[in-house]
Image (spheres, rainbow, N blue to C red):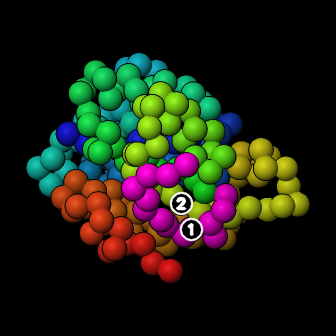
Amino acid sequence: MKLIVGLGNPGKEYENTRHNIGYIFIDKLAQSQNITISKEKFNGLYAETYISNEKVILLKPLSYMNLSGEVVIKFVNFFKINIEDILIISDDLDMDFGRIRLKPNGSSGGHNGLKNIELHLNTQNFKRLKIGIANNKKIDTKDYVLGKFSIEEKEKIQEISDTVINILKDFNIIEFDRLMNKYNRK
């Protein structure tokens, strides 16, 4: 069983903000599978589905970004999910907008959601799909990540949507090293 987690913040005021890019792509994957993420457990919205004959849980923690790990660990324990079967989708300030990068592990890079997941899983060895949101040094970081997408950014999200959905589907059937080789481009 796989667990794919999209990071974000719950509530209307956070919809279509840069920090919610994980939520956005979890929803896009769900739409591609004709399912709705509507079950609630352990302060998370989730759905169970099968992708390529592999059971997958799609999860959106409702605990706010900084406490995402509290939700993730409860799902891991309840569904008995192996750490190597977790993929976390998060925004990344240090990458160009729309750039996609798979990583097998690593530090949080200052991302509070990833930091909290590391704390609760007690490891940095979980897989990540990072989606670049760039950084505007003229705007306070908090205001920038919680800011709404520009028209150009919305277009870029649309451009990369098929690729991201394919990555999430392939996560179930392709060894992670091969997945990175297939999708990580310079």
Query: Foreground: 100 or 116?
Result: 116
Which badge, 2 or 1, is on the more N-terminal residue? 1
In this rendering, position of residue 5 left or right of residue 147: left
Query: Foreground: 24 or 5?
Result: 5
Rendering quarter of residue 80: top left
Q: Which residues are magenta?
A: 93-107
Q: Do residues under tags 2 and 1 come within 8 Å of each other at their CB atoms?
A: yes
Magenta segment includes 115: no
Query: Foreground: 143 or 109?
Result: 109
Locate residue 31, reporting x and y percent. 34, 50
Locate residue 76, reporting x and y percent. 32, 29
Locate residue 153, reporting x and y percent. 64, 66
Q: Amino acid at mark 2?
A: Ile
Tell me the crowding category of disc 2: few under 14, some 14 to 19, or many 20 or more residues within 10 angstroms, Cα based.
Answer: many
The rendered magenta stretch, by its main secondary structure, is classed as loop
The residue indicated by pointer 2 is: 131
Q: Would you place residue 120 above or below residue 150 in this image?
A: above
Point out the image quarter for the N terminus.
top left
The residue indicated by pointer 1 is: 98
Tell me the crowding category of disc 1: few under 14, some 14 to 19, or many 20 or more residues within 10 angstroms, Cα based.
Answer: many
Rendering quarter of residue 93: bottom right
The residue at 38%/22% (across/down) is: 74
Tag 2's secondary structure?
strand
Mark yes or no: residue 39 visible.
no
Q: CA distance from mark 2 to mark 1?
A: 6 Å
The residue at 34%/74% (across/down) is: 181
In this rendering, position of residue 1 left or right of residue 162: left
Query: Foreground: 39 or 140?
Result: 140
The residue at 56%/33% (across/down) is: 116
The residue at 46%/21% (across/down) is: 43
Q: Would you place residue 157 above or below residue 185 in this image?
A: above
Magenta segment includes 106: yes
